[in-house]
Structure formats: C-alpha cells, structure tokens
Image: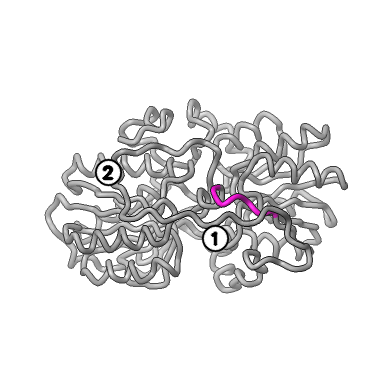
C-alpha cells in the first residue's frame, strides 16, 4: 500500500496540531483568558506539492512507528469494559483500576485553580471550553473554587512551558489543571508543577510521567481506529477501496487512529489509500474527485470529522453512490448523514471530558479517592441513535459536538448555541 501526502499550509497545521477534532468555524474571542507569556514566531511554510509515493517525507512516518500492540489490545478490551458510576453522568464514569489517595489535599474551600490550556483553536476545544466554564460556575457557586486563572498557549509548546512556569513562580495556585499541547515537550513542566506539592490534573493528552494526581482521558486513538475500521469492514467487501482522510502527521492520537485502522483494513483485504488534508474542504473535495476519476470508491475513513461534508459533496458532484463513511459527532456530519441516508458511523473523542478535571478537583479538595488514570467512556453514535442526538442538539451550530455532556449545566442551551464564554 502506497501513501500519498499532500502538504498543508502551516496556518492550517497550527490550528489543528492539538486535537483530533476541528472545523472551519471561527475561533472564539475570549477576553477572560490571560495572554500567554510569549508569542512564538510562526515556522516557515513548507514547500507546496506532493511527496513521492515510494519515499516518505520526514514528516510522514510509517504507521508501524506509532503502533503498540499492548496498548491496542488494552483499548480493544476497554471498548466493552464496565464503567463505574452513573451512565447519565459519563463525565464521572471510569474503568475500575488503581486509585489515588488524596486525603493530604483535603481542605476547606474555596480554592484557586490554575489552568494551562493548549488552545481553544478549533471547535472541539471551543465546545469543551464553554462546558468547562459552565462547570466552573457551578463549583464557584458551591464554594469549591474561588477562581480559575487560565493561560492559553495557542498550540505552542514553548508558550505552554512558560505558562506553567509562570503559575509555579506566582505561587498562588491551589491546584493545577493541564491540557498538554504535546507529550514529551510538556513532561518536564508538568513534573515541576508536581514538585510544588499541589494537586495536578492532566487531561486530554498525556505526558511521560505519572506524577500527576490523575490523568483524565477517553479510551484513546486505537479505540477510535478499531471502531471505525471494523464498521467499514462489516459494510464493505474484500477488495473494496477506502479513501482515508487524515488531518496531519505526527499527532499521537491521530496517528494511533490510523495505525489501528490500517491494521484492520490490511487484515481484511480492504484497499486503503490515505491522504493528509490539513482539514481543508477544498483539498478534501479534490482528493475524492481525483480518486473517483480513476475508479470506484466504496468507503471513506476520517481521523476527525471536520471536512466530512466536503467529502460527501464530492460524491454528489460526481453523481455516484454515497460511500460507507465514518465521520465524527460534530453536528455538520450528523446532519449531512441524516440528509443523505448514507451508511455511516460517528465516532467520538468524548468532549464531555472538559467537565471532569474540575469535578476531580472537587473530590480532591474533599480528600476523596479518585482514579490514578481516569478512563472515560468513548462510544460512537450509530444510525439508530442519530435522530436522538440530532433532536437533543437542535439549534446548535455545525461546529458543536453532540456528546458534549453539558445539558444539566447553567446557560444550556444558549451559551453553546451562541458560543458564549461566561
């Protein structure tokens, strides 16, 4: 199987480098977020053009380099695990495992929280940021948290390192919440936060240390890849062609999604060709159109749902049958999926995880045990469930994520509909 790579503009890559889910919506303007310590200069733009098929570029590593059989096996099993807690509160559920004794942190509130955020540079993060602020309001009203000082790194490692060090030097944080921009680069800064003796909550992406009080995340990228590839295999025939649309190389959770999917496609005789798109709808349409011009395409696989509508429209423009397709729980895909009646699946990278760090701190300040690794549910939306999620999210913008988990929070639904930061 040969891989083709389309280089994306640096601006698109920077906007997407943090997360597995994004859209073409404008970023939120948030005056409540403190300016970061430094503004890093932009990298030089790469040369445009397509790499040779037989010689991968430095950016493009084999999926074998990202594949870990043990982690794959763990996440495969976790997809069917029993989660502790109330299914109506998935943001508090977890897989049973080692617990952290937090009795040393028990203290009367309210407490100041310092949040180092990788960015709010795409709609997945914007949706979560709104939800987090609404959860913050609840905990402020109950006297658990006094304030949450937030610094936004704007997808830059050096900026986020400076942000964390600023919080440490400030010496006024009762707890740290960190959503890392990248894994290895952020590890020393997280360890310095741990060395303060204050509780540290890491979520979304991990780091290469277990010093944090808890690490919160959905099951993971392999689980996404397994769910989506198995769905396509179940609905296609051996020898069918799948076009895999990938945002960009080198992001662990995205690479894990593709590594798992590529493994399953290969084992089941599915011909899969993958492209890096930068989540550019024009580029996505061109890729699909070019593939359709050379033959039939029976399936489309995506490592994030942004641009899914553009992919579907390319089939419409060509006047051919819709593919079997996986997108994401972003509303634009769910709505197009319903409109077209195509055979589809909406995997999720549970957006409700943005509530969990603050709820974890509520437990920590009460001295309650919490999971050392807090693994949250990650369940795709099927066709049988689609109508329910569309109805529940009626009036939400296309860049909203159906499984955001904030229906019981103040401001619902207005602040999500209008993308308001409290």
Q: Main secondary structure of the magenta part?
A: loop
How many C-alpha atoms fall within 10 Å of the one at disc 1: few (<14), some, or many (≥20)? Answer: some
Q: Please name the residue shown 68% across and 53% down the image.
A: 48
Q: Answer left or right for 307 relative to 366.
A: right
Q: Nearer the viewer, residue 182 or 312?
A: 182
| Residue bearing the label numbered 1 | 251
Q: CA distance from mark 1 to mark 2?
A: 29 Å
Task: Give the x, y percent position of residue 119.
Answer: 41, 50
Q: Which mark is residue 136?
A: 2
| Image quadrant where one finds the C terminus | top left
For label 2, the SS is helix
Give residue 288's quadrant in the image. Answer: top right
Magenta highlight range: 6-11
For label 1, the SS is loop
Q: Nearer the viewer, residue 267 or 6?
A: 6
Above or below: residue 420 compared with residue 240:
above
- Label located before the other in sequence (1 or 2): 2
Task: Give the x, y percent position of residue 93.
Answer: 40, 54
Q: Which mark is residue 262?
A: none
């Amino acid at each position: 199987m040969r891989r083709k790579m389309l280089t994306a503009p640096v601006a698109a890559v920077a906007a997407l480098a943090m997360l597995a889910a994004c859209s073409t919506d404008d970023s939120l303007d948030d005056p409540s977020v403190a300016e970061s310590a430094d503004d890093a200069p932009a990298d030089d733009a790469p040369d445009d053009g397509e790499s040779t098929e037989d010689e991968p570029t430095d950016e493009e590593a084999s999926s074998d380099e990202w594949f870990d059989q043990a982690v794959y096996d763990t996440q495969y099993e976790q997809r069917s695990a029993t989660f502790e807690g109330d299914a109506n509160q998935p943001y508090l559920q977890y897989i049973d495992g080692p617990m952290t004794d937090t009795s040393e942190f028990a203290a009367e509130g309210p407490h100041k929280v310092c949040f180092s955020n990788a960015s709010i540079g795409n709609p997945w993060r914007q949706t979560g940021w709104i939800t987090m602020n609404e959860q913050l309001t609840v905990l402020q009203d109950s006297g658990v948290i006094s304030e949450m000082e937030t610094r936004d790194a704007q997808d830059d490692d050096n900026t986020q390192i400076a942000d964390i060090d600023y919080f440490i030097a400030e010496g006024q944080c009762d707890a740290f919440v960190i959503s890392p921009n990248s894994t290895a680069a952020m590890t020393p800064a997280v360890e310095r936060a741990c060395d303060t003796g204050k509780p540290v909550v890491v979520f979304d992406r991990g780091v290469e240390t277990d010093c944090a009080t808890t690490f919160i995340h959905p099951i993971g990228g392999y689980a996404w890849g397994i769910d989506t590839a198995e769905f396509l295999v179940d609905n296609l025939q051996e020898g069918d062609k799948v076009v895999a649309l990938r945002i960009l190389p080198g992001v662990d959770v995205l690479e894990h999604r593709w590594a798992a999917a590529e493994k399953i496609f290969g084992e089941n005789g599915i011909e899969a060709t993958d492209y890096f798109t930068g989540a550019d709808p024009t580029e996505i349409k061109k890729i699909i159109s070019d593939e359709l011009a050379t033959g039939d395409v029976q399936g489309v696989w995506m490592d994030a749902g942004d641009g899914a509508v553009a992919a579907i429209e390319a089939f419409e423009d060509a006047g051919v049958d819709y593919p079997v397709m996986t997108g994401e729980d972003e509303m634009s895909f769910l709505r197009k999926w319903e409109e077209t009646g195509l055979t589809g699946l909406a995997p999720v990278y549970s957006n409700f995880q943005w509530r969990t760090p603050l709820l974890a701190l509520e437990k920590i300040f009460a001295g309650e045990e919490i999971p050392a690794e807090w693994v949250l549910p990650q369940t795709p939306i099927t066709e049988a469930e689609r109508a329910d999620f569309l109805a529940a999210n009626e009036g939400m913008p296309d860049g909203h994520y159906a499984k955001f988990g904030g229906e019981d929070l103040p401001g619902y639904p207005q602040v999500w509909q209008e993308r308001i930061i409290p």
